[in-house]
Each structure stands twice: as C-alpha cells, then as structure tokens.
Amino acid sequence: MPSQLEGAMGALITVFYNYSGNDGDKHKLNKGELKELLNSELTDFLTSQKDPMLVEKIMNDLDSNKDNEVDFNEFVVLVAALTVACNDFFQEQNKNAK
C-alpha cells in the first residue's frame, strides 16, 4: 500500500495525463487542455477569482520554454505554488483563531 505522499504523487501524474494529449502531444497540455484541467480539478479556485484572463495568465506564467504548451514539470510548479499559498492561508487562519 502506498504512503500518503506516494499516493499524492501518483494522483498528480494521473491528473496530468488524464488531460494531456487530447489535442496533440500526450506529454503536454495545450491551452484548452489546461483550461479543462483547471475547470475540472480546481473549480473552487477558479470560481473565487474575478479575472477572466486568469487561465491565459497561468498559461503564460507556467510556459517557461514558451512553446504554448505546459509539460509535466511546468504543471508541478503550478501545483507547488498553489499548495504553498494554501498552507500560508491556513497558517494565517490558525493564528487569527487563537
């Protein structure tokens, strides 16, 4: 049985490849695939944002090699950044609750 961390790593890989390659390279997300992934997997995050250009901005920020696609390494940067932001938020909530 995998550990929690191993399960989380497996989930990241599975989620990425569930959306990548529908319209091209199986190892990359194009803008449409990224938008579908974000809308399906990060619904609460997207609905809380007011910027209609958010997916475009995320794509531009993640696409470090400027090939108009997001590979797995670039995707993990997004997940890590969101995880850090969530951790910071919850730490602040805990401080305010005391």
Image (cartoon, grey):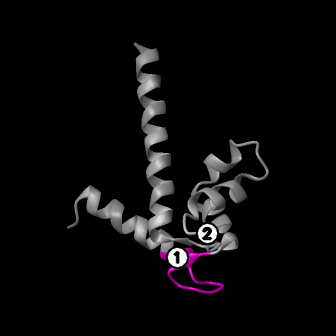
Q: Earlier in the sequence, mark 1 or mark 2?
A: 1
The image position of residue 60, as x and y in percent, is 65, 60
Instruction: Choose mark 1 or mark 2, whichever is in front.
Output: 2
Residue that lies at the very extreme toward the top in this rendered image: 98
| The stretch drawn in magenta includes residue 27 | yes
Q: Residue at x 57, y 75 (%)?
A: 19
| Residue under numbered circle 1 | 18
Is residue 9 highlighted in magenta?
Answer: no
Asked which secondary structure carries label 2, the reply is: loop
Q: Which mark is residue 60?
A: none
Quadrant of the image containing the C terminus:
top left
Residue 51 drawn at (x, y percent): 76, 45
Specify whether 12 is left or right of 66.
left
Q: Amino acid at mark 2?
A: Lys
> For the N terminus, which image quadrant?
bottom left
- State the residue position of label 2: 66
Q: Is residue 9 above or below residue 81?
A: below
Given residues 24 and 86, the one toward you in this image is: 24
Magenta part of the chain = 17-29
Q: Nearer the viewer, residue 60 or 20?
A: 60
Q: Secondary structure at mark 1?
A: helix
Residue type at tag 1: Asn
User: Residues under labels 1 and 2: Cα distance?
Assistant: 23 Å
How many neighbours does mark 1 have within 10 angstroms: few (below 14), some (14-19), or many (20 or more)? few
Magenta residues: mostly which secondary structure?
A: loop
Neighbour tally class for label 2: few under 14, some 14-19, many 20 plus, Cα within 10 Å? few
For this view, does 23 lie left or right of residue 65? right
